[in-house]
Image: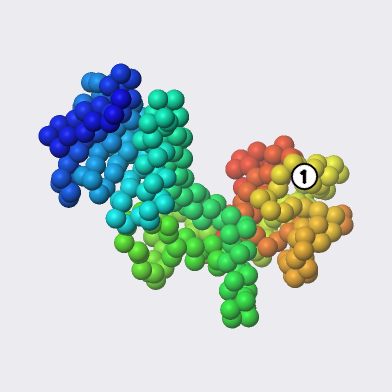
């Protein structure tokens, strides 16, 4: 059966199987024709529809989910694309033998799955980026800090990098205008009667009603590990045995080199030895310290936020 097309209306390419439909428009006049094409395809039960003005070819799977654009398998402009690409795509979807065998429709469905997958990945990228920034991912922070050090010779601390990422860096949605860097906004006012961390509130932690002061957030973490180890000789072994610490490295190990494999600089400058001989990694931001302390509380069977509260300052 030969293919059939007309400028005035819609005809099926293969009427016996109702496997294709064409909507042919004059060049430059295909805008807004999707609705008519989809209405016909829906009522006729056509699985693959083609909208073309002769130059631009749009291949759709009307039965899939989403708006017209999301159901488009492929868009081909035979003027802009090279000849090999045009021939390959037209043969892939329109070759008579492939249509009869059903392989053309399967190829279109496979391409649709790929397009849908790519669309989902693009839509998820901003969410993934926001999560990395909000969670103060240790690998991201370390990569940025290393890059700063390679450019100016000085390495910023993890908290400075995390603060910069939250204040200045965003992954904008597709098509959105780039956002200029803005100076850090002024801190929001603290409600009356609420102690401001690091100012009126003292850095440290409270365990079972007893407050222990500390000089820094890292000292809080170290002191909590020492306290838990004093109360339970198996605590450090059990913490170290956790199947997962950070995304790329361990938080607690027998040696600094185990904390930072392949990074002797970090092992030298960012590790603290506990009284027991174990080593704790300190190249972490305040948010990461909070997560580490929460993990320690789970291992020690201590209720975080109740039996143990912390103030890491700003």
- Dividing the image into 4 quarters, which one contains the C terminus? bottom right
> Hey, which residue is sitting farthest left in the picture?
8
Image coordinates of residue 54 in percent, x first then y, are 23, 46
Question: Would you say 276 lies left or right of 154 here?
Answer: right
Label 1, residues with CA under 10 Å away: few <14, some 14-19, many ≥20: many
Q: Quadrant of the N terminus?
A: top left
Give me the residue at 70% from left, 48% from top.
Answer: 245
Can residue 38 be seen here? no
95 sits left or right of 130 in the view: left
Quarter of the rendering containing residue 269:
bottom right
Nearer the observer, 41 or 278: 41
Residue placed furthest toward the bottom: 152
Kindly identify the residue that appears in the image at 12 percent across and 34 percent down: 8
Check disc 1 and report its element: helix, strand or loop: helix
Q: In this image, 265 relative to 194: left or right?
A: right
In percent of width and height, residue 237 lies at 83, 44
Query: Viewer-proximal residue, 33 or 69?
Result: 33
- The answer to which of 35 and 171 lies nearer the viewer is 35
| Residue drawn at the location 72% of the way across and 54% of the way down | 249
Q: Which residue is mark 1?
A: 239
Residue 24's place in the image compared with 157, above or below, is above
Q: Residue 113 placed where, x, y %?
A: 45, 36
Farthest-out residue, top: 16
Residue 16 spot, x, y in % from top left: 30, 18
- Left or right of 180, for residue 279: right
From the viewer's side, name the closer residue of 91 and 41: 91
């Amino acid at each position: 059966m030969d293919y059939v097309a007309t400028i005035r209306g819609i005809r099926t390419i293969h009427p016996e199987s109702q496997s294709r439909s064409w909507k042919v428009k004059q060049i430059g006049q295909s805008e807004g024709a999707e609705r008519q094409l989809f209405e016909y395809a829906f009522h006729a039960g056509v699985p693959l529809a083609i909208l073309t003005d002769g130059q631009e070819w749009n291949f759709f799977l009307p039965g899939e989910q989403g708006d017209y654009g999301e159901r488009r398998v492929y868009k081909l402009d035979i003027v802009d694309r090279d000849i090999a690409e045009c021939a390959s795509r037209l043969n892939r979807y329109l070759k008579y033998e492939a249509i009869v065998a059903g392989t053309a429709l399967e190829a279109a469905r496979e391409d649709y799955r790929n397009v849908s997958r790519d669309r989902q990945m693009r839509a998820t990228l901003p969410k993934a980026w926001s999560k990395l920034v909000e969670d103060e991912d240790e690998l991201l922070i370390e990569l940025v800090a290393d890059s700063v050090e390679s450019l100016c010779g000085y390495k910023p601390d993890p908290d400075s990098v995390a603060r910069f990422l939250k204040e200045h860096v965003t992954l904008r949605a597709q098509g959105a205008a780039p956002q200029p860097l803005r100076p850090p906004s002024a801190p929001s006012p603290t409600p009356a009667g609420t102690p401001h961390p690091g100012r009126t509130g003292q850095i440290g932690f409270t365990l079972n009603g007893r407050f222990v002061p500390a000089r820094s957030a890292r000292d809080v973490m170290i002191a909590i590990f020492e306290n838990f180890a004093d109360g339970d000789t198996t605590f450090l072994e059990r913490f170290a045995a956790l199947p997962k610490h950070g995304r790329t490295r361990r938080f607690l190990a027998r040696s600094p080199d185990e904390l930072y494999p392949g990074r002797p600089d970090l092992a030298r400058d960012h590790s603290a030895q506990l009284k027991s001989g174990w080593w704790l990694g300190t190249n972490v931001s305040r948010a990461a310290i909070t997560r580490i302390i929460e993990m320690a509380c789970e291992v020690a069977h201590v209720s975080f936020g109740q039996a143990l509260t912390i103030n890491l300052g700003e």
